[in-house]
Image (cartoon, rainbow, N blue to C red):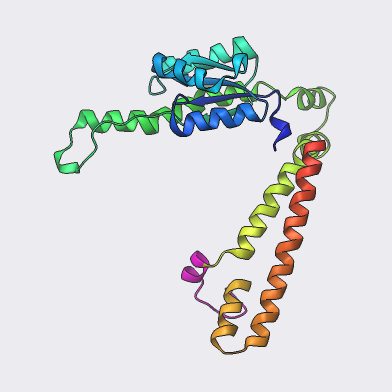
């Protein structure tokens, strides 16, 4: 489904069970090489056995709430694979669960470290590793005297244009189709803050069924055009 993932390197923390394990399996199906990071070796070995993915999945022990562990994890990935393309920071653990009045500082700090600090630590060491790759063209352009704008226009933009267009299309689809949240905050001011879905509702409530049907048909047509463009952009991005 996502051929661009084939041959890429992915990291999944907390990957020995649940959502993490399912994500590891999904990466493997798409052809990626996966590093499964978790604390418990027994559960990790059982996960590797269930995946039956051979050398496509490896395990590295890591407590993501500890900076030294995360630093060693990323250093090991760099040494073994030389790169990191995807990271799913799923790992985390909490302390006290219950009413605040019956909690304690130790449980609070353990929860913050397990769920919040761990995400910061993972990003802190993953981002530099990711930034080390894929800058050759930009650096070559800068060496040849290209300005920042020239580098962006001739090097960076051609490499990201299809992903950028896909993002724009998805945002456009969300903007066209959103109803609930917009209905709450827009104020329903005709011609100013109401979107097409809201306009359909207004016309329908005014018993102007023909106009409501016409606007709804236009919205459906724009949705089909958006889906068609999305398919085209995704295919072009894969070919690129």
Q: Is residue 166 left or right of residue 202?
A: right
Q: Is residue 48 left or right of residue 175?
A: left
Q: Quadrant of the C terminus?
A: top right
In the rendered image, residue 162, in percent from the top left (x then y), is placed at: 76, 43
**Between residues 138 and 74, which one lies in front from this camera angle?**
74
Q: How many marks?
A: 0
Decide if residue 195 is in sight here.
Answer: no
Looking at the image, the residue that sits furthest to the top is 79
In the rendered image, residue 56, in percent from the top left (x then y), is placed at: 62, 18
What residue span does the magenta drawing correspond to?
Answer: 180-193
Q: Relative to 213, does residue 172 appear above or below in the rendering?
A: above
Residue 182 magenta-highlighted: yes
Residue 186 magenta-highlighted: yes
Decide if residue 186 is in sight here.
Answer: yes
Q: Relative to 76, does residue 225 appear above or below in the rendering?
A: below
**Between residues 143 and 8, which one lies in front from this camera angle?**
8
* Residue name at image x 67 percent, y 48 percent: 167
In the rendered image, residue 54, in percent from the top left (x then y), is placed at: 60, 15
* Residue name at image x 39 percent, y 33 percent: 116
Q: Quadrant of the N terminus?
A: top right
Place residue 69 in its image quadrant.
Answer: top left
In the rendered image, residue 91, in percent from the top left (x then y), is placed at: 43, 28
**Between residues 176 and 133, which one lies in front from this camera angle?**
176
**Between residues 237 and 189, which one lies in front from this camera angle?**
237
């Amino acid at each position: 489904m996502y051929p661009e993932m084939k041959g890429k390197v992915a990291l999944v923390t907390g990957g020995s069970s649940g959502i993490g394990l399912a994500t590891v399996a999904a990466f493997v199906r798409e052809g990626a090489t996966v590093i499964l990071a978790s604390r418990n070796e027994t559960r990790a070995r059982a996960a590797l056995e269930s995946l039956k993915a051979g050398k496509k999945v490896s395990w590295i022990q890591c407590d993501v709430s500890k900076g030294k562990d995360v630093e060693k994890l990323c250093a090991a990935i760099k040494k073994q694979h030389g790169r990191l393309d995807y990271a799913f920071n799923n790992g985390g653990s909490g302390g006290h669960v219950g009413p605040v009045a019956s909690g304690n500082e130790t449980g609070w700090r353990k929860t913050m470290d397990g769920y919040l600090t761990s995400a910061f630590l993972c990003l802190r060491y993953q981002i530099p590793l990711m930034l080390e790759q894929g800058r050759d063209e930009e650096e070559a352009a800068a060496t040849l005297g290209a300005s920042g704008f020239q580098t962006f226009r001739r090097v960076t933009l051609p490499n990201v244009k299809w992903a950028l267009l896909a993002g724009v299309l998805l945002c456009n689809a969300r903007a066209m189709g959103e109803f609930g949240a917009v209905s709450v905050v827009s104020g329903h001011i005709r011609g100013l803050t109401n979107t097409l879905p809201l306009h359909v509702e207004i016309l329908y409530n005014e018993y102007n069924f023909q106009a409501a049907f016409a606007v709804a048909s236009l919205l459906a047509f724009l949705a089909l055009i958006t889906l068609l463009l999305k398919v085209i952009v995704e295919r072009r991005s894969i070919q690129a």
